[in-house]
Amino acid sequence: MTVRLPGSLNPTNMMATGLGILEYELMSERASTLGQNGLKVEAALAALQEAEAKGKHGVEHERLVDTAAQAVWAMFIHREICGLRNGREIIQRYGIPNKVLARLGASPRHP
């Protein structure tokens, strides 16, 4: 006996109705935006690490921490919208420091 998908879920029918094309475009946009968010997180964390390596502290350091926290927060929110709920993987992959994680969702201290 052969098992088939119902006609409404058949991928060939989805392409004919345009639903498959729309889904493809939406997934493409989600992936692109996630990639852009990742680049922003990498840049913010690199700037923070560079400042710490130079021994910079004070208001400038706090702004860099705030910028990194905002970038990470935006990425987490976008990932949740896409259905990706596990943040531990991102924390490990990008090496997000605890001081940045502690400020997620908070208003910047030094606007």
Image (cartoon, rainbow, N blue to C red):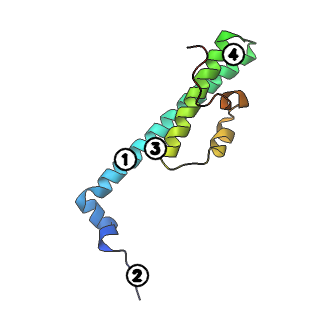
Q: Is residue 37 left or right of residue 100?
A: left
The disc labelled 3 sits on which kind of residue? Ala
Q: Are the two marked residues, 4 and 1, in contact with CB atoms closer than 8 angstroms?
A: no
In-front residue for pair 25/60: 60
Residue 31 is marked as 3
Give the residue number, with chain letter if any, for mark 1: 26
Q: Is residue 76 above or below residue 71?
A: below
| Helix, strand or loop under label 3 | helix
Q: Is residue 107 left or right of residue 56?
A: left
Sequence order check, earlier mark of 2 and 3: 2
Within 10 Å of the Cα at label 4, are there few (<14), some (14-19), or many (20+) other Cα atoms? Answer: some
Residue in view at x 69 percent, y 22 percent: 49
Q: Is residue 64 above or below residue 26?
A: above
Whole-Å distance between the Cαs marked 4 and 1? 38 Å
Residue 3 is marked as 2
Whole-Å distance between the Cαs marked 2 and 3? 32 Å
Sequence order check, earlier mark of 2 and 1: 2
Sequence order check, earlier mark of 4 and 3: 3
In-front residue for pair 83/31: 83
Whole-Å distance between the Cαs marked 4 and 3? 30 Å
The disc labelled 2 sits on which kind of residue? Val
Tell me the quarter of the picture where residue 98 sits: top right
Q: Are the two marked residues, 4 and 2, in contact with CB atoms closer than 8 angstroms?
A: no
Give the residue number, with chain letter if any, for mark 4: 51
Residue in view at x 56 percent, y 33 percent: 73
| Helix, strand or loop under label 1 | helix
Residue 3 x/y as whole percent: 40, 81
Within 10 Å of the Cα at label 1, are there few (<14), some (14-19), or many (20+) other Cα atoms? Answer: few
